[in-house]
Every structure is written in C-alpha cells, then in structure tokens.
C-alpha cells in the first residue's frame, strides 16, 4: 500500500536566495509527517511506499517547471504543485491566511473576505486535484492535511468512490457562531468538501464537538457516535491529538552536536535562569502578552533583575501579510521597551533572535532552559510545548502553557494560564522560577509518560487504522 500525503506546502520549497535553491518549511505539520515518513523508510509502517504532493512555494515560469519536477522526484518522493501568482495570492495569502486562519483562531476582526479570494481557493483546490488524479493508483491511501485543502476530499471522492481518504485539520475548528460568519456558499462547500473523507481528524474533543454542531446547523446532518450517515457511505469525525517523535527528540538531545551547543550556551548564561519562548511569527501566538508579563515580572519581583534571561526566538512567517508585519513591529518595540528599561552594563533581559532554528539548535535551547513559556492566544495543538518536555530530563524544565492550546488536554501537569491575562502569566513565571525540584519531577514524569506512549507514530497509525475501518464494515455501521 502506498501513502499519498497532500498538504499545502512541501517539506522543502523553492528559495532562489538559498545556495541549494530550496528552503526547509516550518510548522508542526511538516515536522510531524516527516517523522512518520522516516518510519515508512525504515520499514516500521504498514506502507511500503509514499508520495508527498504539495505547493512548491513560489510561482515558476512554465519552461522551468519540468526541471524542478525532476529535481523533486529524483531527490525526494515529492510532486510539486505550481500556482500562478494571481491564484497563489488569492488562495494562500487572502483566503487561507486572511479568512480561514483568523476566523478559525477566533480573530474575526482580522478576517478580510473577498469573493475573488474564495474563487482562487476553489481554483487552487482543483489544481491540487488535477495533480492527484494523475498520481492515484489502486489501493493508494490518501491523507490530506489542513485548512488549505478542505474542498479536496469530495473532489477525489466523486471520481474515486472506493479510495481511502483521511483528512486532518491541524488548526482549531471554531464554534458555529464563528464559522457562520463565512458566506453560506463557503460554509456549505467547505463542509461538503470535508465529508468526502472517510475520516475527518481533529486534535481535541472541543473541535470535534464544534464540527458536529456546525454540520448539523449548516447541512442538517446528525452525527451518531461521531459517524455521519451519508446514504451510500459514512464519514467519521474523530479525535487524534498529534504527538511528537519522542524518541528522535531524545536522541537529538543527547547527540554530540546538541550537547556541544548546550555546553557553550549554558556556559555563557551560567549566571541566569533561562526562560524560553519559541514561535513561528503569528498574532495568534500571544507574544506581546508574554513580553508584557516578563516586563511586569521585573517590575513586581525585582529580585529577578540580573538573575533571569528571556530567550525569545521567532521564526519569520507569512511576511507578505500586513497583520504579520504589524505584530513583528509590535514585538520589536516591546523587546526594545524591556531592554531599554532594565538593561545594565552586564545584563540584557531579552535575548531576541528572529530566525528559523533547526531541531538540533532547538533541542539545545530546550535543554538549557528552566522555563518553557508557551502562551498562544489560540493554537490547534502546539508541538513546541511537547518538544520542550521531551528534550529535558524529568527533573528539568517547567512548562507554562495556555489553556487555549490543544496541547493542554494532554499536558495537564503544566502550569496552565489564561493567555489573555498578563497578570496570570507574570505569576506563573514567578511560580515556575521558584518551583522545587521535587514538584518539577512529579509534574514532568507524568508528561513524559504521555508523550512517550502516544507519539507521532501512534497518532498516524490510529488515523490510518480508523480510516481503514470506516466504510469497511458497512453492515454494522448501517444499523446506527
Ligand atoms: O500549523 C498550521 C500551518 O498552517 C501549517 O499548515 C503550516 O505547516 C504552518 O502553519 C506554517 O504556515 P505557512 O505554510 O503558511 O508558512
């Protein structure tokens, strides 16, 4: 059996400013699926082979496309999708990132709907479909990812009624009151599009419940025990909290390269407690509130002055979008405010890095930090929180985690906070910095257990197994 993965972006996209001509994509989706592909490659998965179909990340003139296709195929098993500039802008920048992304994260004021961008979204989904159609072979298993491709399952289903299709949403599914802000035609098309999948997977029970409520309101379909009877087939909504590659993170953390990095940074910062904050640049991540909380910590608990450092790492993302430019400026100002107010001859309170780190660099930072500060205003899951725990031994590292991040449902031993309350974050930081080793160990052991027993392979295997089962036992399901 072959696994066809379909996502908006390929794990590496074209970047002519880079020597290799490509750059690594960021985000939990790519990290997680790449880990699963490693399992396929090493023969510990039920798939014998795989193919990844996704956008090349840049518009390329037609005469150059063949060469790029060959490069992707020969070096990786990737099939690039090319979108012209107009479609790319309307689809990715406008509909995906200025309509769906803000709405699904409850930032309705940031949403900017245009009929033309919806047309581009439909068009891009058709372009993806046309490429998939050329690749599909009998017995392929198709796994579609994320909000960019919500119309795709039904498009495939119309022409391939028996193929196995799984869809996974990596971001929250919002409440019906938010979803209904989309024009009705969009609502219906998105939901019908998703229902083409055998399984629609989400990270948490809340997202699953909101989805069921929404399909009942918009399409009048009732789910019974998570299953929707569509007449000739079924679609199941199920909960699969995405895991990390716990073993790989552990291995990287103790590798020579990582240990070296840890040693150097630890030596440089040996006089300080380290608070770590790592994110893709996004207004949903709550970075400003986090910085305000750190500012307040230094004001309210002056005993931490010259005793603590905030290591702030932000990976550039979606730079062409105004709301992202704006949040970047706000972060720069806030860092300036803190460093301007509190710096001394031998101490800078915020060490700020605006760059994309690799996993070795990240694990080195996780491993030397006393506190992991993960305070998104809304987040589908947040794998950084999980990686932070995994990269440390149980007696090291206190995790502060938003109650609005999907990960909190598994990591309930973290200090959970309301990310909109700066005061709560401030108190949580102080609590984390003064927590006893015994309490840290007690909390972290339980989180390690969870993360090691339900990792990215368990997540993928469960999704695949559930998808295989739906519609294969029609007789018993029809009784529902
Ligand atoms: O996690 C949500 C997501 O949109 C992923 O699909 C993607 O990998 C990541 O964020 C990065 O976003 P973008 O592809 O827009 O840079």
Image (cartoon, rainbow, N blue to C red):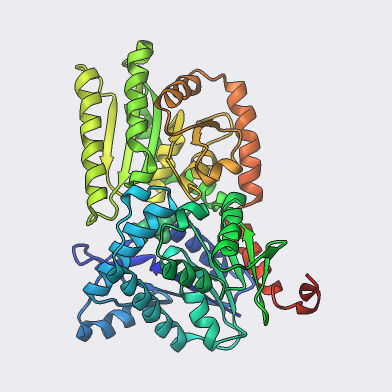
Percent across and percent down for residue 339 are: 23, 24
Depth check: 478 or 214 in front?
214
Note whether 114 is above or below 104 in the view shown.
below
Q: In this view, does 163 lie to the left or right of 5?
A: right
Note whether 413 is above or below 80 in the view shown.
above
Q: Which residue lies furthest to the top in this view?
A: 303
Residue at the spot 36% in from the left edge and 81% down from the top edge:
127
State which image quarter holds ligand 1. Answer: bottom left
Q: In which quarter of the image is residue 440?
A: top right
Note whether 408 is above or below 30 in the view shown.
above
Classify the position of the C terminus by image quarter: bottom right
Residue at the spot 44% in from the left edge and 54% down from the top edge:
104
Q: In this view, does 186 lie to the left or right of 354?
A: right
Percent across and percent down for residue 230 are: 65, 76
Percent across and percent down for residue 246 are: 56, 49
Decide if residue 51 is in sight here: no
Total labels drawn: 0
Note whether 13 is above or below 287 in the view shown.
below
Q: In this view, does 409 lie to the left or right of 91?
A: right
Percent across and percent down for residue 316 are: 28, 50
Residue at the spot 42% in from the left edge and 68% down from the top edge:
186
Decide if residue 71 is in sight here: yes
Depth check: 50 or 287 in front?
287
Q: In which quarter of the image is residue 369?
A: top left
Classify the position of the N terminus by image quarter: bottom right
Depth check: 122 or 302 in front?
122
Depth check: 149 or 34 in front?
149
């Amino acid at each position: 059996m072959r696994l066809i993965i379909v996502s908006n972006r390929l794990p590496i996209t074209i970047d002519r400013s880079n020597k290799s001509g490509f750059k690594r994509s960021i985000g939990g989706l790519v990290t997680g699926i790449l880990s699963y592909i490693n399992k396929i490659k090493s023969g510990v998965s039920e798939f014998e082979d795989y193919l990844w179909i996704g956008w090349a990340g840049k518009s390329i003139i037609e005469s150059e496309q063949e060469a790029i296709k060959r490069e992707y195929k020969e070096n990786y098993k990737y099939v690039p999708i090319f979108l012209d500039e107009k479609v790319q802008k309307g689809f990715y920048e406008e509909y995906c990132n200025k309509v769906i992304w803000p709405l699904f994260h409850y930032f309705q004021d940031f949403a900017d709907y245009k009929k033309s961008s919806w047309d581009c979204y439909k068009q891009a989904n058709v372009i993806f479909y046309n490429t998939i159609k050329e690749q599909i072979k009998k017995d392929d298993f198709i796994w579609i990812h994320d909000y960019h491709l919500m119309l795709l399952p039904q498009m495939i289903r119309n022409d391939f009624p028996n193929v196995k299709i799984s869809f996974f949403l990596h971001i929250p599914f919002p409440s019906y009151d938010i979803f209904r802000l989309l024009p009705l035609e969009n609502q219906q098309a998105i939901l019908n599009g998703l229902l083409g999948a055998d399984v629609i997977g989400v990270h948490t029970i809340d997202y699953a419940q909101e989805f069921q409520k929404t399909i009942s309101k918009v399409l009048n379909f009732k789910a019974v025990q998570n299953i929707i009877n569509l007449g000739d087939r079924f679609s199941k909504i199920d909960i699969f909290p995405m895991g990390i590659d716990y073993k790989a993170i552990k291995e990287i953390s103790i590798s020579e390269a990582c240990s070296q990095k840890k040693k150097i940074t630890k030596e440089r910062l040996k006089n300080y407690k380290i608070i770590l904050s790592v994110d893709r640049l996004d207004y949903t991540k709550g970075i400003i509130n986090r910085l305000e909380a750190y500012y307040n910590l230094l004001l309210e608990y002056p005993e931490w002055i010259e005793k603590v450092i905030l290591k702030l790492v932000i990976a550039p993302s979606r730079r062409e979008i105004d709301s992202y430019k704006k949040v970047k400026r706000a972060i720069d100002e806030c860092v300036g405010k803190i460093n301007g107010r509190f710096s001394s001859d031998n101490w800078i309170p915020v060490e700020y890095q605006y760059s994309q780190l690799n996993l070795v660099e990240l694990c080195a930072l996780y491993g030397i930090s006393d506190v992991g500060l993960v305070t998104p205003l809304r987040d589908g899951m947040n794998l950084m929180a999980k990686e932070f725990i995994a990269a440390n031994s149980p007696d090291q590292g206190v995790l502060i985690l938003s109650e609005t991040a999907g990960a909190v449902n598994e990591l309930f031993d973290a200090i959970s906070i309301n990310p909109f309350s700066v005061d709560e974050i401030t108190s949580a930081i102080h609590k984390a910095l003064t927590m006893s080793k015994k309490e840290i160990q007690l909390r972290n052991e339980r989180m390690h257990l969870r993360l090691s027993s339900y990792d990215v392979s368990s997540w993928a295997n469960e999704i695949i197994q559930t998808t295989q089962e739906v519609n294969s036992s029609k007789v018993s399901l029809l009784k529902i």
